[in-house]
Image: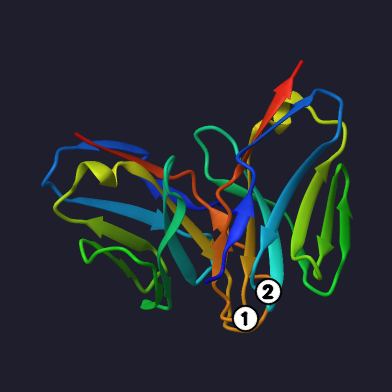
Amino acid sequence: KAGVTQTPRYLIKTRGQQVTLSCSPISGHRSVSWYQQTPGQGLQFLFEYFSETQRNKGNFPGRFSGRQFSNSRSEMNVSTLELGDSALYLCASSDNRGRPGANVLTFGAGSRLTVL
Amino acid sequence: GEDVEQSLFLSVREGDSSVINCTYTDSSSTYLYWYKQEPGAGLQLLTYIFSNMDMKQDQRLTVLLNKKDKHLSLRIADTQTGDSAIYFCAERGSNYQLIWGAGTKLIIKP
């Protein structure tokens, strides 16, 4: 079974630009979550999508958005980039079926964004 | 609000046992997790424990849960250089949201 695939792995942008990151979950997983990881703030939850609907959202400004397609692939977009958006963006999928359970997350390797 | 706390660093000698500690505040936690992150990689699940258990063992890993004190620990026996990584503790509360600790960097001394 292929793991969670994130593209691109590395990218450099300048302030004011926008960026789109892609995540392909494990086959059969319908839940995709996005996290921002920085040395100062640690792991911060961005949002979770399930069956093309945003189910949960973290405390990030509206410049951060996402979507999920019918094949469960997900994208996140950051508009008007700021220096502080430099981070490792992690995507994780699970087979969360909406019932209580361990709902283990499987993470991708991440997309490292540098904003100059 | 809900919070998970971990020490930022732990240094142990190769061959010794490592014990990484975590405290949490949500008494209605259902599951508690340990994830490992190696340099340049995403997080990898090591193990998890259901809140009605107090211990779980898996090869070199032992998880202890003290619900009364809201304390979770991960013991790695016979620590090797390949265990160098950041270890994250996380809890899943009653609303199914994950709350993450800041991560403990495990440093192995030869």
Identify residue type, mark 1.
Ser
> Chain under label 2?
B
Q: Give residue B100's position: percent from left, percent from top.
A: 56, 58
A8 or B89, which is in the foreground? Answer: B89
A10 relative position to B96: left or right? left
**Residue A8 seen in render:** no
User: Looking at the image, what colour scheme do you see?
Assistant: rainbow
Answer whether labels 1 and 2 touch (C-beta < 8 Å): yes
Apparent side of residue A15 relative to residue B7 in the rendered image (left or right): left
Q: Amino acid at mark 2?
A: Ser
- Residue B66's x, y, as percent? 83, 64
What residue do we see at 44% from left, 40% from top? A39
Q: Which quarter shows the N terminus of chain A?
A: bottom right
Farthest-out residue, top: B110
Residue in the image at 50% along x and 53% along y: A4
Where on the picture, by quarter, is residue B98? Answer: bottom right
Going by the picture, which residue comes out furthest to the left? A16
Left or right placement of residue A47 versus residue B110 in this view: left
Which residue is the site of mark 1? B94
- Which element carries disc 1, helix, strand or loop? loop
Q: Quadrant of residue A99?
A: bottom right
Tags 1 and 2 on a common chain: yes
Which residue corresponds to mark 2? B29
Q: Residue furthest bottom?
A: A99
**Comes first in the chain, label 1 or label 2:** 2
Near-viewer residue (A107 or B5): B5
Q: What is the CA distance from the residue labelled 1 to the residue labelled 2?
A: 6 Å
Tell me which residue sits at (55%, 51%) in the image: A3
- Spot occupied by residue B29 in the image (x, y as percentages of width and height): 68, 74
